[in-house]
């Protein structure tokens, strides 16, 4: 018996039945227009308005990496021309007139010879850069990235060994919100369909840290008051939230019920919008260092200084020291606490404090990229391993049981069964066996406390489907029925849940209700056409029911967004054969 699921959020691959109903609704694969949510007039004014009064600060800021974190693709373009050995694909990034193009070609494969217009770049280029393109207003990241530390073009992170071109990497809001200003939120019900322009201002602008400026300009003109946020003057938790919105990653991030991380504004508590969790084990010396914030929390400097120390103790967001001044600049920051007398006797011949106490090393999860060790260790390891994935350290020994710790820690966050349950479920969906039991236990608790939370209900349905998948030789009907009921309730509360709709479709198809399954898949695929598994379920279903025209339209839609998907290319060959077939 085949497994039900491959996996994105929950696995999905339809258990193909021996017979198919003939009453499947025929629907074209064309995507309908989706209405976006109306927005109120923006209180944001842009960098130039700030520059009129703060010219010197603005001029300094324009030379920082944050100011250049995004923009039009044509700006400071880095051309590419290389062959990826594993996939055999020749990639080029080049200009034609005022347009930038990504071409991809595999010699000997006529199906792989195409191009996409690149619209925006993401990343200042200091460590790397990627590009964005759009297909039918759905935005995607380029499958190739520029890695500045090694000065090479290569595949996007995690795709170095891919044998198929990953052309369907969604440009998620979580990426855009930390590289752009005035980002358009995704159109309701989608993950990566946006109105244009994608963002209103290049880079990380003034108001990303200081909040909307319109009222400040009016007040300053009338009363000379300063109704603008200065992060350094905020209470510590809110001050740190300004930096954490982009410089805290954790192992898992869970948006709060009814909230989105991109709704955060300076002055808010980030924890009110999204909670971050870090994995720790009993055998580990502390939290895994996934980003600057978790690492800094492990440092003796931070532990002894407490709230008095923040990112801004060492970093000025408006200024990036030139390379030749970096050692002296950061040495001065160190001596501000440790004193010049200490500096005069502590290795006076070595002026670069960071070289010894904050060394850089290769990231373990992003190729060709170095990261700086923010643990500020007194005696650093010879080869510090940052960005460790604690899941890779899983062991069956009792003293290595992983724990999820909210970061920053608070008892309220630690006691929040909803967010912790969803955090464990996210880890379980990504392959952690040790997370399964925790997700199962906590999601059942959360469902009792939050019976009308669609994310909780959908997560618990995933757990029930996992139980069903464990029965290799039989079907666990109770678990399947429970999952169906939970998905139906979740979709009743939030009809836009793509994974819930796709997985409920699998359940309905397995039970023989193909009409319901196809309806669910069609609606989900319309809002997530880059989710190839949904499109392939539709194509196979129509094919098996003899509706070759519709099967072909869906597999072509799959290939429009994912042109190198081998299963889709094979199915299209079968559909175009004489007589047409569906393959195995």
Image: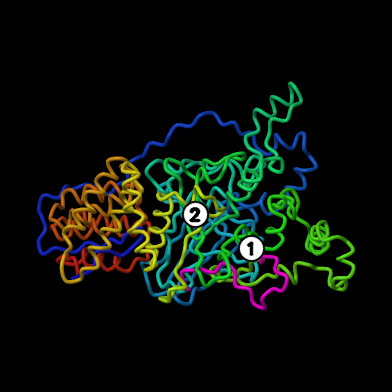
Does 115 appear above or below 363? above
Whole-percent x, y for residue 52 in the image: 76, 34
Q: Is residue 379 magenta?
A: yes
Whole-percent x, y for residue 145 in the image: 55, 64
Q: Is residue 37 magenta?
A: no
Q: Main secondary structure of the magenta part?
A: loop
Q: Residue at x 51, y 29 (%)?
A: 40
* Residue 18, disc: none
Q: Label 2, label 1: how many angstroms apart (C-alpha)?
A: 44 Å
Whole-percent x, y for residue 59 in the image: 77, 45
Whole-percent x, y for residue 1 in the image: 18, 71
Nearest the viewer among 91 and 221 is: 221
Q: Which residue is mark 2?
A: 117
Whichever of labels 2 and 1 marks the residue nearer the N terminus, that label is 2
Q: Residue at x 86, y 65 (%)?
A: 342
Q: Residue at x 73, y 30 (%)?
A: 226
- Which range is magenta? 373-393
| Foreground disc of the pair 2, 1 | 1
Nearest the viewer among 119 and 467 is: 467
| Quadrant of res 573 | bottom left
Q: Which residue is mark 1?
A: 298
| Quadrant of res 430 | bottom left
Specify whether 495 is left or right of 20.
Answer: right
Nearest the viewer among 584 and 262 is: 262
């Amino acid at each position: 018996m085949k497994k039900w699921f491959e996996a994105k959020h929950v696995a999905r691959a339809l258990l193909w039945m021996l017979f198919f109903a003939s009453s499947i609704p025929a629907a074209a694969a064309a995507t309908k227009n989706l209405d976006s949510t109306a927005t109120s007039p923006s209180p944001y004014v842009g960098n130039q308005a700030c520059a009129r009064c703060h010219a010197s600060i603005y001029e300094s800021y324009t030379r920082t990496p944050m100011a250049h974190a995004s923009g039009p693709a044509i700006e400071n373009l880095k051309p590419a021309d290389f062959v990826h050995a594993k996939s055999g694909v020749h990639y080029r990034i080049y200009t034609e007139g005022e347009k930038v193009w990504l071409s991809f070609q595999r010699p000997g494969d006529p199906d792989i010879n195409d191009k996409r217009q690149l619209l925006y770049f993401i990343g200042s280029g200091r460590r790397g850069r990627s590009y964005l393109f759009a297909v039918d207003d759905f935005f995607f990241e380029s499958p190739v990235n520029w890695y500045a530390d090694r000065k090479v073009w290569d595949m996007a992170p995690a795709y170095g060994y891919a044998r198929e071109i990953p052309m369907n990497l969604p440009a998620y809001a979580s990426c855009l919100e930390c590289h752009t200003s005035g980002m358009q939120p995704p159109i309701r019900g989608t993950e990566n369909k946006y109105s244009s322009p994608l963002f209103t201002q290049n880079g990380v602008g003034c108001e990303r840290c200081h909040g909307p400026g319109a009222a400040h300009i009016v007040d300053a003109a009338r009363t000379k008051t300063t109704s603008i946020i200065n992060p350094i003057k905020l209470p510590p938790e809110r001050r740190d939230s300004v930096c954490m919105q982009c410089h805290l990653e954790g192992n898992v991030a869970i948006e709060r019920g009814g909230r989105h991380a991109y709704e955060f504004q300076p002055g808010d508590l980030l924890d009110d919008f999204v909670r971050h969790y870090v994995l720790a084990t009993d055998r580990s010396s502390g939290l895994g260092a996934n980003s600057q914030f978790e690492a800094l929390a492990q440092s003796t400097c931070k532990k002894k200084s407490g709230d008095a120390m923040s990112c801004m103790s060492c970093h000025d967001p408006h200024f990036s020291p030139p390379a030749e001044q970096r050692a002296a600049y950061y040495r001065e920051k160190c001596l501000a606490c440790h004193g010049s007398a200490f500096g005069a006797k502590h290795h006076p011949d070595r002026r670069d404090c960071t070289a010894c106490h904050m060394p850089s090393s290769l990231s373990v999860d992003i190729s060709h990229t170095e990261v700086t060790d923010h643990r500020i260790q007194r005696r650093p390891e010879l080869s510090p391993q940052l960005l460790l994935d604690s899941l890779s350290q899983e062991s069956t020994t009792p003293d290595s049981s992983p724990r999820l710790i909210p970061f920053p820690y608070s008892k309220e966050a630690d006691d929040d069964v909803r967010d912790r349950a969803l955090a464990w479920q996210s880890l379980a969906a990504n392959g952690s066996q040790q997370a399964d039991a925790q997700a199962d236990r906590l999601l059942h608790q959360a469902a009792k406390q939050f019976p009308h939370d669609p994310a909780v209900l959908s997560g618990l349905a995933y757990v029930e489907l996992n139980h069903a998948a464990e029965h290799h030789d039989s079907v666990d009907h109770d678990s399947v029925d429970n999952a169906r009921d939970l998905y139906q309730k979740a979709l009743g509360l939030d009809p836009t849940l793509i994974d819930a709709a796709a997985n409920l479709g699998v359940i309905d198809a397995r039970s023989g209700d193909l009409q319901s399954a196809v309806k669910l898949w069609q609606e989900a695929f319309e809002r997530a056409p880059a989710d190839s598994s949904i499109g392939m379920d539709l194509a196979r279903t129509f094919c098996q029911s003899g509706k070759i025209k519709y099967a072909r339209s869906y597999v072509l839609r799959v290939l429009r967004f994912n042109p190198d998907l081998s299963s889709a290319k094979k199915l299209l060959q079968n559909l175009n054969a004489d007589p047409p077939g569906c393959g195995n």
